[in-house]
Amino acid sequence: MRQRIARRLRDNPQLVLFLLAVFALGVGNGIFQTTYNNYLSDIFGIGATARGALEFPRELPGFLVALLAGALVFLAENRVAALAAAFTGLGMIGLGLIDARWGLMLLFTVVWSIGGHVEMPMRSAIAMSLGTQRQHGRRLGQTSAARVGANILGALLVWLVIDYVGNNWTITFTVGGLAAIVGALVYLRLRPVQGQRQRARFVVKRRYGLYYALCTLFGARKQVFLTFAPWVLVTVYGQPASTFAKLWIAASVLGVFFQQGLGDLIDRWGERRVLMADGMMLVLICLGYAFAGRLGLPHGWPVRMLYVCYVLDQLLFGVENARSAYLAKIAERPEDLSPSLSMGISLNHAVSMLVPFIGGKYVWDVFGYEWVFVGAAGLSVLTIIAAGRVRTPQRDREVEERGERAATDDLSTGG
């Protein structure tokens, strides 16, 4: 086993460097995601409406990512990713050093967000460039596994700091920011893929319409999870930051194996089946968030049920790889890939900027948090319908070949 792993590392050093960069950024991401909501509640004491409104500036860079990435078209993907990682690190360090000043918190949150969102499409494009088309799912799965594996370390650091030092946001965010800067330095050592053409500055094509629709639906679903799922646990069930660290550790341990298996499943099953299964699971998870407290469960069990929903939802974020693999298979030209991935991120953020404000002000505060998740379940149903229309040229050829083989077998047996 050791010899086989050593041989793979020796034969593909670019993949190793790439996964190291992803891992370093994953540590910072694990720290940020497990502390940000508690940081806002502890330092600024905001409510659901303000928390939802804060998502607009936080997600604005995601909406603009196609323009931001297009403006950096003169740089190779690895250098864009390095610059983005540096922004992520500086944003986190800035959050750790300020006091309770709303304006500076917004500024450094946006800086962090610019880095995180610009790095997303670059990460997927680089991952798929390091394998053949039949390996896209595997490469994306390995990338996700490295990222969620790093979340274990990031969440563990949060757990230790919160439990033994207290809510020391300076230490927490500084450590996360330094990890992201390490990722930037490793990205700089990654060579551009040989033979890679200069990517297009901006791509919008009717051919990619279904991909855009899937990204838009994902944006709404994603933001409900990122904003309101932890907010339920914080404000309704009174969970501390260390709880989210433990949940992230659980999700990350499972995710190391789940994401690699999911990548192989995408290659084997095809994107359509994986995306439809994701939508079905999300319906159940959303209903769990909505009605766990109304099922008459014994004391303590509703919050345990939400723990399970949280972990499952975190794992299913890896299904984003199925959308990326689908786009790679229908892309007209290789240089369409990263700008089209960026456009997908922009579209999903166009929705995700509005969902928290509407969900917080007009749904949560008026009708109750349950109806936020009922609406998300409805969006998951639309995702199932849209995913059912996914078709790829490679998958269609495989189906035709299986049909031809079956017909030949019937003729040979006199059937």
Image (spheres, helix red, strand yellow):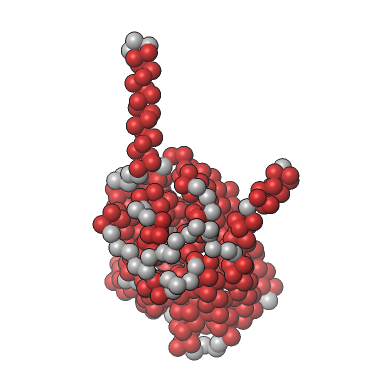
Query: Looking at the image, which residue sits at the far top?
Result: 414
Q: Would you place residue 340 above or below residue 73 in this image?
A: above
Quarter of the image holding residue 201?
Answer: bottom left
Q: Residue furthest left?
A: 206
- Give the residue at x 53% y 74%: 83
Q: Measuring from the top left, give residue 286's x and y in whole percent.
A: 39, 55
Identify the image quadrant of residue 401: top left
Point out residue 11 in the picture as x, y percentages from the top left corner.
Answer: 65, 50
Residue ID at (48%, 64%):
122
Camera-side residue of 89 and 299: 89
The residue drawn where x is 46% and y is 70% is 118
Q: Quadrant of the C terminus?
A: top left
User: Residue most toward the right?
Assistant: 2
Q: Is residue 108 left or right of residue 214?
A: right
Residue 71 horizontal/vertical position (percent): 40, 75
Residue occupying image coordinates x 45% and y 53%: 321
Give the percent coordinates (x, y) of residue 266. Answer: 46, 44
Camera-side residue: 213 or 67? 67
Say which quadrant the N terminus sits in: top right
Residue 23 visible somewhere in the drawing: no
Q: Is residue 407 visible?
A: yes
Q: In this image, 195 relative to 397: left or right? A: right
The number of discs equals 0
